[in-house]
Amino acid sequence: MNTIEQFNKYVMHSYGRYDLVPEHGNGEIMTDEDGKEYIDFGSGIGTNSLGFCNDEWVEAICYQAKKIQHTSNYYYTKVQADFAKTLCETAGFSKVFFGNSGAEANECAIKLARKYSFDKYGAGRHKILTLVNSFHGRTLCTLSATGQDVFHNYFFPFVEGFDYVEANNIADLHAKIDDTVCAVMFEYIQGEGGVLPLEKEFVDEIFKICAEKDILTIADEVQTGVGRTGKFLAGEHFGKKADITTLAKGLAGGIPIGACLAGEKCADVFTPGTHASTFGGNPICCAGGQAVLNKLNSAGFLDEVAKKGEYFREKLLAMPEVKSVSGKGLMIGIELKTKNAADVVKAGLQNGLMLLTAKTKVRLLPPLTITYEEIDKGLAILAKLLS
Ligand SMILES: Cc1ncc(COP(=O)(O)O)c(C=O)c1O
C-alpha cells in the first residue's frame, strides 16, 4: 500500500487533497516522496512564514524541545512570558491569550467580547456582527461567525447571536447595529473569500460607530497578520487598531498556535477559570513564535516583504491572462481572464509549483523569506501555465 492509499484508509476524508506527498523542505523548495522539487508559493496556506525548516527557527524549537516541551497552564514558563512580551510590544496590545489555531483565537475573541459586554451591561447584549463572505474557522461557533451560507449546513443547530453585514455597505452596517450588538468582527482583507480588501471608508465607519456605542472591534488577522501584507498587522494599512486582534497561521512558523490580543479596554476581562486551553502557550510553539518575531522585527524585513509584493504584482500584471491582482504585500489574489484557477493550481503541481486558490482566483501566500531568484523561477512556471 502506498502512502496515499494508507492515508485514505485511515484518515477521514474531510479534505479534497492533491496527489502529492511532501517529504522534506528547505527554504522555498519542497521535495516530494519521489524526489521531485517544487517552488512553494503557498507556505502551507500562509503558515510556514520563514519557509521550510529555517535554521534559526529549527534551532529555537529543538532547543526548547530538549529543555521542556510542555508544563500546564497551572504554572508559568519564561519562554511564554518572553514571547508574550515581544508579541504584545510588536503588535501594540496589552495582553494576549494563546490557543492553538485561528478558530480558537476567534472563539477566544468572541467569548472575550461577550464577557466584556456582560460584565458592563448585563445579559442580552451578545450579538456579534460579521461580514458576508468572511471566513473565521471551522468550530461550530466560528462557522456560525462565518458569513457564508455554504458553511451553514449539516451541523445544526449553529451558535446563536451572529448577524452578517454586507462588506463595504455602510447603510447595512447601520441597519444591523442595535442594542444587542457587543462586537463587530472582520478581516481587513477577506482571504478565503477571494483576497478582497475592505474599503477604507467602511473600515473607518466600523471604528467610528463602535467607538460611539462601546461596541468592540475584532480584527481577524489570522491570515493577514504577522507580516503577511508588509506590515505586522494589516490594520496598519488602514491606520486602525481593533480592540481585539486574532493571529494564528504564520505566527509560530508552521507549528500550532493561535493568539487573541486585547487592548487596554478589554485586556482584563477573563478571570481565572473563564477561558483555558491545555496546549495554549506551549513552550515549543512559543519558542518558534519568538524566532519568527525576531526575524520580522529585524531591520528592513517587513519593507522587503512589501517590496517583494510589488515585484510580484508588476510581473503578474504583465501576463496577458491576468485580469487583475488584489491583496497587499505577499497576500496576492490573481483574477484570470479565461482559465480556471483550480486547473492552474493542478497544472502548477505537475510543473513543480505550489499554488493556492481563493474562490475563483489563484492565490499566492509565499514564505515571507522568499528570494527574488525563487520568485522569478516560480513566476516563469506560472507564466508558462497561463500562456
Ligand atoms: C481569516 C481566517 N480566520 C480563521 C481561520 C481559521 O484558522 P484555523 O484553520 O487555524 O482554525 C482562517 C483559516 O484559513 C482564516 O483565514
Image (cartoon, grey):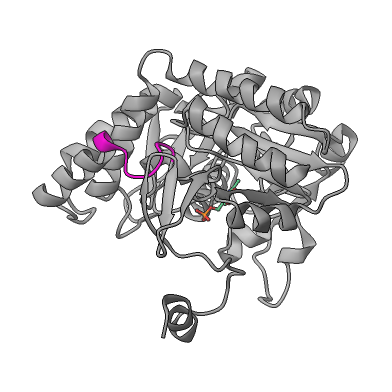
Residue 238 is situated, as x and y percent measured from the top left of the image, at: 66, 21
User: Looking at this rendering, what residue extends furthest in the left direction?
Assistant: 67
Q: Above or below — where is 232 with respect to 273?
A: above
Q: Nearer the viewer, residue 305 or 234?
A: 305
Question: Which residue appears at 45% of the width and 36% of the height?
Answer: 261
Residue 363 is situated, as x and y percent measured from the top left of the image, at: 66, 44
Quadrant of the rendered structure where residue 69 is? Answer: bottom left
Q: Quadrant of the N terminus?
A: bottom left
Question: Which residue appears at 51% of the width and 44% of the height?
Answer: 39
Q: Above or below — where is 298 with respect to 157?
A: above
In-image side of 198 versus 109 (left or right)? right
Q: Above or below — where is 234 with respect to 256?
A: above
Question: Which residue appears at 69% of the width and 57% of the height?
Answer: 161
Q: Nearer the viewer, residue 234 or 121?
A: 234
The answer to whether any part of residue 73 appears in the image is yes
In-image side of 308 versus 193 (left or right)? left
Considering the whole magenta stretch, tell me its main secondary structure.
loop
Please give the range of residues in magenta: 49-56
Q: Nearer the viewer, residue 272 or 30?
A: 30
Is residue 53 shown in magenta?
Answer: yes
User: Looking at this rendering, what residue extends furthest in the top direction?
Assistant: 299
Q: Nearer the viewer, residue 258 or 265?
A: 258
Residue 160 is situated, as x and y percent measured from the top left of the image, at: 68, 63
Quadrant of the rendered structure where residue 94 is? Answer: top left
Quadrant of the rendered structure where residue 299 is? Answer: top left
Q: Quadrant of the C terminus?
A: top right
The answer to whether any part of residue 219 appears in the image is no
Residue 35 is situated, as x and y percent measured from the top left of the image, at: 40, 59
Is residue 226 shown in magenta?
Answer: no
Count of labels shown?
Answer: 0
Question: Which residue appears at 45% of the width and 65% of the height?
Answer: 21
In-image side of 340 versus 37 (left or right)? right
